[in-house]
Image: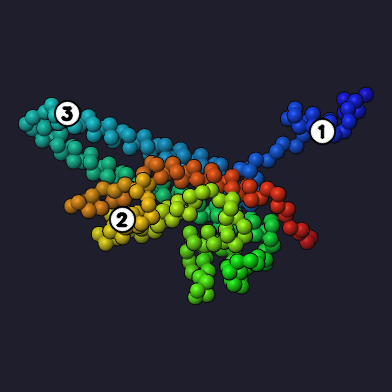
Amino acid sequence: MAEKDKVPGWLYEELLKDAGAGIPELSDRDRAGLILERMDYEEQLIAISGLLGRNKSTDEQLEAERGEILVFIQRSSGSALERAIDESGENFYAMVYQGAEHSMAALGMLAPMYESMFFQAFQGIRNRYFGKTAIPSGHHRNAIADPDAFWNCRKHYEKKTGEVNNDVVSGILQLSKAIGLKKYLPPGLPKTLQALFDYRNFMFHNGFEWPEDRCAVFAAHIERGGWQAWFGWSERSNKPWIFYMNEQFINHCLAMIHKLLEGLGAYCRGRNPIETVR
């Protein structure tokens, strides 16, 4: 007699579950793949973390060299001291510009990943749970008559004017609310996106060294947004000169991606795909 014939069917199924047999439970993180079919987010995160780690090592190397130079300066005199002071200046500028380079490298990986992840997730949600031509009701964003524009998270509908503007952060947040995704998003995500994409706009349009007025504007954004713990800067003539994402903010952005994947998967859990007409 087969083992399953010796016990009631319901008990046999429970025993299978307890033994880890049967169909494995899909985690929310894995379930996010249902709407991110064209995105291998795990491999992307591995690649990003690898480059960030290598950049951190080179930063630490420069810092160690600076420490050695400063010690040598304290013990030197004459021409040796002059050469050491020159080396200290070269090391300082190397640290400043390498810091800007690594900040832009981190920004250039993180901001596009967020934007691509949201765009593809919305398209996956659209096709899997609503339908390609569907425009959900219940939110003023549904005044956008074109389904492609409605589901484009780079677009934001301005209720007061009826205009549709390009604004990726506002678009992401508005579309999330319109389709019931907002409650699944991690706490603090709006602030994170605003800081990340604001810095992206300044950095990618101005490079490492911004005009003085742009530095003043971004410094005001940091103050107003409460981002002081996320950005650092070098100064020239006691004024901001070069801005950096600090390690705390970079790690925060990475951690937020992991939480976002969980949220996207939680949104998918319990939702049934629409019927597809073949």
Image coords of residue 168 (percent x, y): 49, 61
Residue 13 numbered tag: 1
Image coords of residue 270 (percent x, y): 70, 49
Image coords of residue 50 (percent x, y): 46, 38
| 3 or 2: tag closer to the N-terminus | 3
Image coords of residue 120 (percent x, y): 58, 55
Separation (CA) of disc 3 from disc 1: 73 Å
Q: Categorize mark 3 by other alpha carbons within 10 Å: few (<14), some (14-19), many (20+).
A: some
Q: What's the residue type where badge 3 is placed?
A: Phe
Secondary-structure class at tag 2 = helix
Separation (CA) of disc 3 from disc 2: 36 Å
* Tag 2 residue: 219
Residue plotted at (57% across, 46% down): 261
Q: What's the residue type where badge 1 is placed?
A: Glu
Residue 209 shown left or right of residue 39 in the figure: left
Residue 83 shown left or right of residue 27 in the figure: left
Residue plotted at (41% across, 53% down): 195
The quarter of the picture where the N terminus appears is top right
Q: What's the residue type where badge 2 is placed?
A: Ala
* Tag 3 residue: 72
Residue 248 numbered tag: none
Residue plotted at (76% across, 32% down): 17
